[in-house]
Amino acid sequence: MSTETSGIHMNRGLLILFGIILLAIGLFASFYQETHYFLHIGYETVTPYQSIGIVLDIAGIVFIALGFLIPSPRASQTTFPQTNASKTKEESSAIPPPPPPPEQPRSTADFVKKCINCGREIPSAWEECQYCKASQRDPT
């Protein structure tokens, strides 16, 4: 029995990563300084992007917090197999059968055949021998 969820699926790791990126950009913007020359005052150091930096810092902290607070999709969608009360203890603890053996690789003999006219080996997909030009189709 599966449950379907509607809405947007959010990846926790991406939220945390996005929050860290916003936080780093916000910190850089908050402490970025420029030196400007004002006519009667002289040179003065200003921080022109400090307000944007603070907003980005707050947004980064919110995204990082959301990344840690949103439940994991694996934890919320975990389903447990239903147990049958009529099973005996031996049946419920039985070891499942081993998986079938992997398919054996094909040999080159599977891809070649002998020409019906000259007897040389040719690829099995060819309808005509490349050496004697004899047709490889059955005459029947």
Image: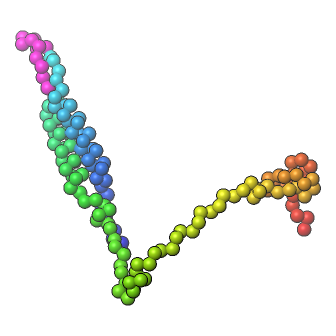
Name above or below for residue 65 compared with residue 42.
Answer: below
Q: Residue furthest bottom?
A: 86
Q: Residue furthest front?
A: 90
Q: Which residue is found at the position 40% from the left and 78% from the top?
A: 93
Specify whether residue 135 is in view: no
Image quadrant for the N terminus? Answer: bottom left
Q: Is residue 60 left or right of residue 5?
A: left
Residue 112 percent coordinates (x, y)? 79, 55
Q: Which residues are magenta?
A: 37-48
Can you tell which quarter of the image residue 108 is in? bottom right
Can you tell which quarter of the image residue 36 is in? top left
Name above or below for residue 97 compared with residue 16.
Answer: below
Magenta-span inclusion, residue 39? yes
Between 113 and 98, the residue placed more toward the observer is 98
Colouring used for the render: rainbow
Name above or below for residue 131 compared with residue 23.
Answer: below
Q: Which residue is found at the position 91% from the left and 64% from the top?
A: 139
Residue 53 percent coordinates (x, y)? 17, 35
Q: Is residue 18 left or right of residue 108?
A: left
Residue 8 percent coordinates (x, y)? 30, 58
Between 92 and 36, the residue placed more toward the observer is 92
Q: Is residue 35 left or right of residue 110?
A: left
Q: Which residue is found at the position 41% from the left and 83% from the top?
A: 90
Image quadrant for the C terminus? Answer: bottom right
Q: Which residue is found at the position 38% from the left and 84% from the top?
A: 89
Can you tell which quarter of the image residue 31 is in? top left
Specify whether residue 2 is in view: yes
Magenta-span inclusion, residue 113? no
Name above or below for residue 51 compared with residue 69.
Answer: above
Residue 52 percent coordinates (x, y)? 17, 35
Count of numbered circles on the image: 0
